[in-house]
């Protein structure tokens, strides 16, 4: 058996390298099942891919799926988005944490396992990747300081909703200024007294050249920031007058443009809840 699985090296690999709990990296993937394939896609992801194509991999230690029903899709901003065309595209979002310092090791495994899954007919083809990228963690801003769950808890804590925000800066230099403004001024002010418990900020990284062909190369690597807002309330209850003002606040700072602001609620694992409300 050891000759086939090389199980003798597992102990060696576990004894070296980083093994902290900080989410140094993330996989953030927003996908649109093709019309008529919503139920089949959801069952494939729930029953197979979430585990075989993600959680079973080394160093990917937390994950959660989110869904945007049609009413949530219609809340999205801006109307013309550089991320999603149309802006309502991408009704499922999956988020995964990868251990800090283990990106390279994880990528080697994920490319290998996805090639194997594809050969074995275990990759659902009737879907479109709207926004899929591995990302490096840049910062986390908390509403309650050290009193609440940490970012490494965020995908396990029962948050009621999540908002995906994508901001594009004009240049790499402006992107650095944008990051500092978000971390030190904008987010602390916005989080105070709100139903948003924390916001994580990530920067996308290029996908490897041997990635699967159905996943397009990442755009805006040097100029884009991805924010995940973790909510203690349904996003519908705090959208107007809070999230609807974010694009204006970023524009007034002169540091970037919000290209996507999209609310989601968590899926219920193992079920088809919400699938009949996507269209």
Image (cartoon, grey):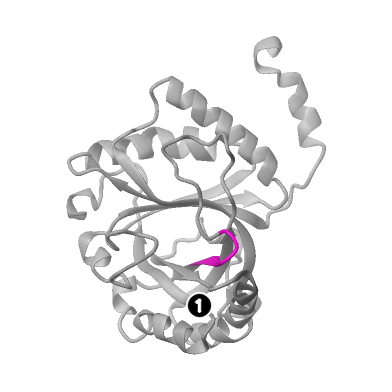
Question: Where residue 162 appears, x then y in whole percent?
Answer: 41, 65
- Counting every numbered tag in the picture gives 1
According to the picture, the residue beneath numbered tag 1 turns out to be 256
Question: Which quadrant of the figure has residue 124?
Answer: top left
Q: Is residue 7 above or below residue 56?
A: above
Q: Which residue does the image show at 30% across and 69% down from the upper left?
A: 80
Q: Is residue 161 above or below residue 18?
A: below
**Mark 1, residues whose alpha carbon is within 10 Å: few (<14), some, or many (≥20)?**
many
Taking the image as shown, residue 196 lies to the left or right of residue 141, namely left
Q: Is residue 266 above or below residue 233?
A: above
Q: Which residue does the image show at 22% across and 39% down from the upper left?
A: 37
Taking the image as shown, residue 1 lies to the left or right of residue 112, namely right
Query: Residue extending furthest front?
Result: 171
Stretch in magenta: 221-227
Q: Which residue does the image show at 45% across and 61% down from the upper left?
A: 158
Q: Which residue does the image show at 82% across and 36% down from the upper left?
A: 15
Specify whether residue 199 is in view.
Answer: yes
Question: Where residue 182 appears, x then y in whole percent?
Answer: 57, 79
* Viewport quadrant of the C terminus: bottom left
Secondary structure beneath dot 1 equals loop
């Amino acid at each position: 058996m050891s000759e086939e699985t090389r199980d003798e090296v597992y102990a060696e690999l576990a004894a070296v390298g980083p093994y902290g709990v900080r989410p140094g990296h993330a996989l953030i993937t927003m996908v649109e099942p093709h019309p008529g394939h919503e139920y089949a896609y959801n069952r494939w992801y729930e029953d197979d891919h979430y585990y075989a194509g993600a959680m079973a991999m080394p160093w990917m230690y937390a994950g959660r799926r989110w869904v945007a029903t049609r009413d949530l899709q219609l809340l999205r901003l801006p109307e013309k988005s550089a991320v999603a065309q149309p802006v309502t595209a991408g009704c499922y979002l999956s988020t995964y944490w990868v251990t800090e310092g283990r990106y390279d090791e994880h990528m080697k495994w994920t490319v290998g396992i996805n090639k194997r899954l594809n050969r074995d007919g275990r990759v659902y083809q009737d879907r479109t990747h709207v926004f899929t990228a591995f990302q490096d963690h840049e910062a986390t801003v908390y509403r309650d300081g050290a009193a609440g769950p940490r970012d490494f808890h965020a995908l396990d804590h029962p948050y009621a909703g999540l908002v995906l925000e994508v901001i594009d800066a004009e240049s790499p230099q402006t992107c650095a200024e944008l990051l500092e403004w978000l971390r030190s001024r904008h987010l602390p002010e916005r989080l105070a007294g709100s139903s948003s418990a924390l916001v994580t900020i990530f920067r996308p990284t290029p996908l490897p050249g041997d990635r699967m062909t159905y996943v397009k190369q990442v755009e805006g690597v040097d100029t884009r920031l991805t924010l995940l807002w973790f909510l203690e309330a349904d996003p519908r209850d705090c959208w107007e007058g809070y999230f609807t003002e974010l694009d204006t606040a970023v524009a007034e700072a002169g540091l970037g443009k919000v290209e996507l602001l999209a609310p989601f609620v968590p899926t219920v694992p193992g079920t088809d809840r919400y699938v009949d409300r996507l269209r």
